[in-house]
Image (cartoon, coloured by chain):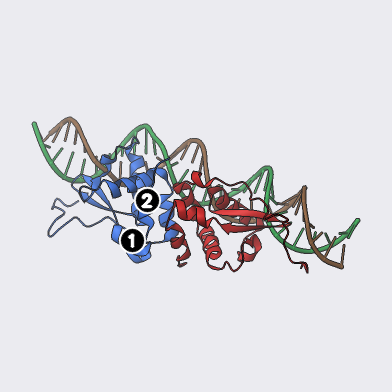
Chain colours: A blue, B red, C green, D brown
Amino acid sequence: MPDIKVLPEPAGLPSPLPEPDAAELSLPVVLGALSDPLRLGIVRKLLLDREEFDHPCGWFGIDRPKSSLTHHFKALREAGVLRQRQYGLERRSEVRIADLDERFPGLLNLVASWTTP
Amino acid sequence: MPDIKVLPEPAGLPSPLPEPDAAELSLPVVLGALSDPLRLGIVRKLLLDREEFDHPCGWFGIDRPKSSLTHHFKALREAGVLRQRQYGLERRSEVRIADLDERFPGLLNLVASWTTP
DNA sequence: GTACTTGTACGAGTTTGGTCGAACTTAGCA
DNA sequence: TGCTAAGTTCGACCAAACTCGTACAAGTAC
């Protein structure tokens, strides 16, 4: 394993974790990722409370074990809903707003205006 | 084939099969129902090819056993996406456009413009 | 009546997905 | 050096869902 620093930041942000291209986004897959109330709440909170760019997994106040959170954030990222970057220890997430609005206009509005029943 | 025009209903249409109220529609549940490509195709076809009011299950040209189709149409109906009425032998389906547009505006546009990959 | 058609109901097999514990990796810090 | 914190990976368990065959019910037509 390299002891050389990862060179995390030459010019900007850390490169995102593996994710599908914008052109590959699939509506059934995205809908499936959003069909879980916990994940829908994560995306909604990211859309509404984004006073910062992105948030670590911990800042959602979800009362679940860490391995469960990993599972859900990974599902959202692999579906193309979230982009995740590694900042030192923490892995911050943001919604891929531009990509989703371009491919599925109106979808994020539905998520943002979701009222948990 | 009937030579008598259909009009099977004296006062109106047959009452719909059990379905959730418009106020009970749940975004995660609806998204889950639409996250299956086969079901997404059913709803899309209903939205685009509706020269008539509603269609029997058979007129979708889906190459699956009948018990599988029953399963998927039931899933869509119980999620509140479809309304189904019994016309003699056949059970015709229509999309609950008004209810869905009112609760989740823009969602049906996404479904209608879905391009199967 | 018989035969045909549309669709359901039930059950079994299989797959997928959510939940979680435990062990591990990594970064930062004292 | 060691500790702590954030998050992953693995494996297991369990529940839900998809697929399908078979049997069955109810109209329709002859």
User: Residue at label 2?
Assistant: A111
The picture places residue B62, in percent across and down from the top left corner, at 60, 64
Residue plotted at (44% across, 47% down)? B28
Q: Earlier in the sequence, mark 1 or mark 2?
A: 1
Q: Where, by quadrant of the figure, is residue B56 drawn?
A: bottom right
| Near-viewer residue (A107 or C10) | A107
The picture places residue D23, in percent across and down from the top left corner, at 76, 49
Q: Could one spot residue A21 in this view of the protein? A: no
Describe residue A1's horizontal placement relative to residue B31 as left or right. left
Describe residue C16's horizontal placement relative to residue A10 as left or right. right
Describe residue A90's horizontal placement relative to residue C5 as left or right. left
Q: Quadrant of the C terminus of chain B?
A: bottom left
Q: How many marks?
A: 2
| Near-viewer residue (A105 or A30) | A105
Residue plotted at (36% across, 49% down)? A113
Indicate the secondary structure of the residue bearing disc 1: helix
Q: Chain of mark 2?
A: A
Q: Quadrant of the N terminus of chain B?
A: bottom right
User: Residue at label 1?
Assistant: A101
Instruction: Determine crowd level at label 2: few under 14, some 14-19, many 20+ residues with C-alpha closer than 10 A.
Output: many
Q: CA distance from mark 1 to mark 2?
A: 12 Å
Disc 1 marks which amino acid?
Asp
Tags 1 and 2 on a common chain: yes
Indicate the secondary structure of the residue bearing disc 2: helix
The picture places residue A80, in percent across and down from the top left corner, at 34, 57
Taking B116 as reference, is A1 above or below it? Answer: above
Instruction: Determine crowd level at label 1: few under 14, some 14-19, many 20+ residues with C-alpha closer than 10 A.
Output: few
Disc 2 marks which amino acid?
Val
Taking B1 as reference, is A66 above or below it? Answer: above
